[in-house]
Image: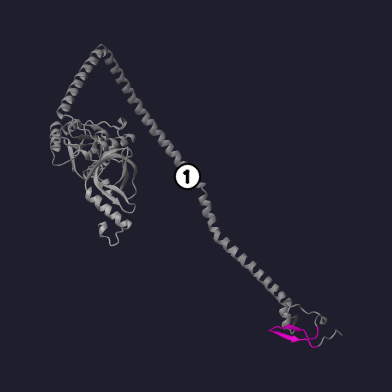
């Protein structure tokens, strides 16, 4: 909308801001700017807000989440950057700003800066310490390969492994070695081989390429997977001049994939030759030692013959003594057995079991006598109880009531009236009979005559 098109020629703030935004976006749709990052903010939305400044001026800039996630390095305060974006206006505050679609550090590539930042971070955690490095196994049973299944690197490694040690088993975990999403798959393959327990050592790598092609081996997830592997890891990424963070975390860095294969696989023919040489040397040494002992024992041959005769005489005496000892032991055991039998008969004769069996016959008679005695005592006690019950019945007030008497009580306190003067005319009393009760009015109180 143009100013002269307004019916009144007056704009609202929103209309003016919209006009300015349209003009700026049309005039500056794509521009490159350089400056220093300051006032950097990174809220939970994932967007990045900062101020781009030089010595005289400043402008606000925003990098939305989709672009921020593609950054290879960590944006930080004071970093001098070159950026590309479009100029626009943030209408709620009326501020003009640059919306970015590309950002790189000035004087150093984004990949190189990201490399240095992550290297410094992981080095502080100790992932590159030499004390963590483990020696490679001398003769592994199986080697794991984490690499592309179609590259030249795997062919070179398999060729070297077969040539050096044909009996060595190989377990291949094929993964993409460049491009988006390659790093997580490489890390998962390393972790799976580490946890499987099926390999003694693994080689992680690929052939040569640009820094961008090798970048997945600089990703933090890959470096941490190598550092936490339970088996030694050989890094073989690119050529001899190529270095990645995987090389620093690995237990051994090989200049090429072929060199990595040579590092983990000894030459089988050399091992067999060395073992054969050791066997022959040991056999010669043993023959020489036996000959030396024979020469040393030669002067003592006569003494050995006499010693042999003496040993034979002692052996004969030993057989004689052994025979007599056996006969004596047999006789002693027979005598001991007879004494044991005699003791057993004596014990059976004085055993309390026989006395218990004899006494057990008397038990039923004693039980019957106890039962009779108890019945007699119970009969006496029953008679005593009957007498006591009869006496209690005679003394019971209820028995007296049964003979025609009654008990008089005042109302309402229930006090028993024993004398006529305890009540007055007009009072109510309760008369308790043998069966039932009566409520009576006192009409007249008669004194005792």
Secondary structure category for the residue under label 1: helix
Where does label 1 land, which residue? 345
Vertically, is 383 above or below 181?
below
Residue beneath the point at 69% across and 70% down: 384
Q: Is residue 350 above or below residue 78?
A: below
313 with respect to 139 (left or right):
right
Closest to the observer, 393 or 230: 230
Q: Pick out the residue farthest to the bottom.
A: 443
Q: Name the quadrant containing residue 385.
A: bottom right
- 80 and 159: which one is in front? 80
| Position in image of residue 134 (x %, y %) | 28, 32
- The question of residue 435 being in magenta is answered with yes
- Can you see residue 102? no
| Quarter of the view holding residue 161 | top left
Circle 1 Cα neighbour tier, 10 Å, few/some/many (<14 / 14–19 / ≥20) = few
Residue name at image x 18 percent, y 26 percent: 275
Q: Residue furthest top?
A: 299
- Numbered-mark total: 1
Viewer-side residue, 288 vs 314: 288
Which of the image's four quarters has the C terminus? bottom right
Residue 186: x and y in percent read 22, 42
Which stretch appears magenta?
424-443
Relative to 337, is 65 above or below? Answer: below
Residue 61: x %, y % from top left: 30, 45
Q: Nearer the viewer, residue 163 or 424?
A: 163
Which residue of the protein is positioned furthest toward the right in this rendering?
Answer: 449
> Residue 166 vs residue 329: left or right?
left
- Residue 80 appears in the figure: yes
Residue 82, given in percent of the width and then of the height, sits at 25, 40
Q: Is residue 439 magenta?
A: yes
Q: Name which quarter of the figure residue 53 lies in.
A: top left
């Amino acid at each position: 909308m143009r100013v002269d098109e307004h019916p009144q020629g007056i704009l609202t703030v929103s209309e003016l801001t919209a006009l300015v935004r349209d003009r700026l976006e049309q005039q500056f749709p794509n521009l490159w700017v350089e400056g220093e990052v300051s006032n950097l903010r990174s809220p939970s939305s994932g967007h990045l807000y900062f101020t781009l400044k030089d010595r005289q001026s400043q402008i606000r800039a925003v990098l939305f989440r989709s672009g921020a996630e593609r950054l290879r390095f960590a944006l930080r305060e004071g970093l001098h950057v070159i950026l590309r974006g479009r100029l626009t206006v943030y209408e709620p505050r009326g501020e003009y700003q640059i919306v970015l679609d590309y950002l790189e550090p000035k004087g150093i590539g984004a990949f190189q800066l990201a490399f240095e930042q992550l290297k410094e971070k992981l080095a502080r955690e100790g992932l590159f310490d030499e004390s963590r490095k483990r020696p490679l196994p001398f003769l592994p049973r199986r080697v794991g390969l984490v690499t592309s299944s179609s590259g030249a690197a795997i062919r070179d490694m398999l060729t070297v492994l077969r040539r050096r040690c044909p009996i060595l088993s190989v377990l291949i975990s094929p993964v993409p070695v460049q491009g988006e999403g390659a790093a997580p798959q490489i890390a998962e393959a390393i972790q799976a081989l580490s946890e499987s327990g099926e390999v003694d050592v693994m080689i992680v790598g690929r052939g040569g390429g640009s820094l961008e092609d090798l970048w997945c081996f600089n990703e933090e997830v890959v470096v941490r997977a190598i550092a936490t592997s339970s088996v030694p890891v050989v890094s073989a990424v690119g050529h001899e001049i190529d270095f990645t963070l995987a090389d620093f975390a690995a237990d051994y860095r090989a200049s090429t994939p072929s060199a990595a294969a040579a590092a983990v696989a000894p030459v089988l023919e050399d091992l067999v030759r060395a073992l054969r040489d050791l066997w022959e040397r040991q056999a010669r040494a043993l023959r020489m030692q036996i000959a030396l002992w024979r020469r040393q024992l030669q002067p003592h041959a006569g003494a050995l013959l006499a010693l042999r005769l003496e040993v034979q005489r002692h052996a004969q005496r030993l057989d004689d003594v052994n025979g007599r000892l056996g006969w004596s032991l047999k006789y002693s055991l027979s005598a001991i057995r007879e004494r044991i039998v005699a003791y057993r008969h004596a014990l059976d004769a004085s055993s309390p079991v026989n006395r218990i069996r004899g006494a057990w016959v008397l038990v039923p008679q004693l039980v019957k006598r106890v039962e009779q005695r108890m019945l007699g005592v119970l009969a006496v006690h029953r008679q005593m109880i009957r007498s006591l019950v009869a006496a209690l019945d005679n003394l019971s007030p209820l028995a007296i009531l049964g003979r025609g008497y009654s008990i008089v009580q005042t109302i309402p306190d229930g006090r028993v009236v024993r004398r006529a003067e305890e009540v007055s005319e007009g009072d109510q009393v309760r008369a308790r009979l043998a069966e039932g009760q009566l409520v009576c009015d006192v009409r007249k109180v008669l004194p005792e005559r």
